[in-house]
Amino acid sequence: MATFKTKTDKGLKPLSTASLPDIVFMLLFFFMISTSFRQTERVVSVKLPEATEIAKLDRKDLASYINIGTPIPAYQSQFGTEARIQLNDSFSTIDDIRDFIAASRESMSEADRPLMTVALKVDENVRMGIVTDVKQELRRCSALRIMYSTRRKAENTGF
Amino acid sequence: MAKPAGEINAGSMADIAFLLLIFFLVTTTMDVETGIQRRLPPMPDENQQAEVEQINKRNIMVVLINSSDRLFAGGQEMHITMLKDKVKEFITNPANLPNMPEKRENDIEGFGPVMVSRAVVSLQNDRGTSYDAYIQVQNELVKAFNELRDDFSMQHFGKKYESLDEDQQRIVRDAVPMNLSEREPREVTTRRR
């Protein structure tokens, strides 16, 4: 009887996948370091304006965010379409900013408190009135380091 | 003699790691926070009357954005693309005109005497100005100051401002101060009534 010579005994071993976990772990660590957790659920829609003279926020952990924009469609029946302020996860008023700033200060270490930055994420169609009110309230709370969050403007190639 | 311990099967390790990886990919964001960083002026003390710093009229340039997003700078209406050059010309006052800002010789530590312009750019806006227009103007003003700083550092250090070391940056900052003031919004409100 004829026997087929199988190739296996010639020594073609299956591809070793022993280093696969290492590769995946490397990817995992890369993503863990270079990303941050999603902060909060947005209840206002914010389309940031564009700018060119922008600086990177050095310490993300020292930033607190104030979102201003129109409520997302799901909340529009309840809150209307007028621009609103969002602190943490909920709609807020100017008067809530004081407590919000105090709470964010409280959560930072003593040494970091002067470095706290308030990032204003404001929709580009919002009127300045509400932004001015927020800025005045921030001045009253002596949270003076602010940042107007913007997107990087796409370089126009030809004039 | 004890049996040699067999190798632990590490085949599922990759699956576990993939699971973790996908979890992190879904729950995290990678966007870098960018924006225009500014410092608000501290609130004047209510008890003591705020001492209004008298600034010579020739040193002030008023940049005004009205409620329909039209831009006025130095008393004339202009397009936003012209603003930067106008501001730069105003700050440097190249021809030393008497109606443009004066310069004062300042002795900067570690560098020497420099003619520092005393120009102040005053940004005013209406409550009805759109945020986008406001940011565009802020951007142009910051750009004007940044370009002046770059010019100065190219001239004296042969490098751009960003690539200077900390001490040199301080010198450039002192030589080209960013005097950008925002008017008290209260006055803007009354203006509108």
Image: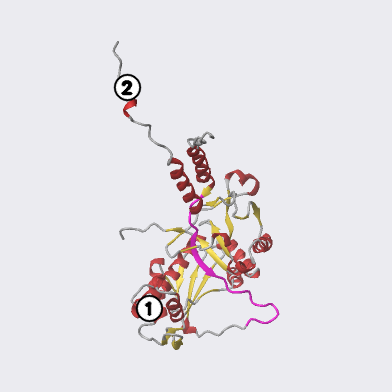
Q: Which residues are magenta?
A: B29-50
Label 1 residue SS: helix
Q: Judge left or right: residue B100 versus residue B46.
A: left
Residue at mark 1 shares a chain with residue at mark 2 = no
Furthest toward the top, the residue is: A1
- Place of residue A14 in the rendered image (x, y in percent of width and height, measured from the top left): 38, 32
Q: Nearer the viewer, residue B67 or B7?
A: B7
Up the image or down, B101 lies above or below B17; here it is below
Label 2 residue SS: loop
Q: Quadrant of residue A129?
A: bottom right
Q: Judge left or right: residue B19 versus residue A14.
A: right
Furthest toward the right, the residue is: B47
Q: Tell me the mark number nearer the camera, choosing from 1 and 2.
A: 2
Residue type pointed to by label 1: Phe
Numbered disc 1: what chain? B
- The label shown at residue B152 is 1
| Residue at (39% x, 57% y) in the render | A154
Q: Which residue is mark 2?
A: A6
Residue A78 is covered by the magenta coloring: no
Chief SS of the magenta region: loop
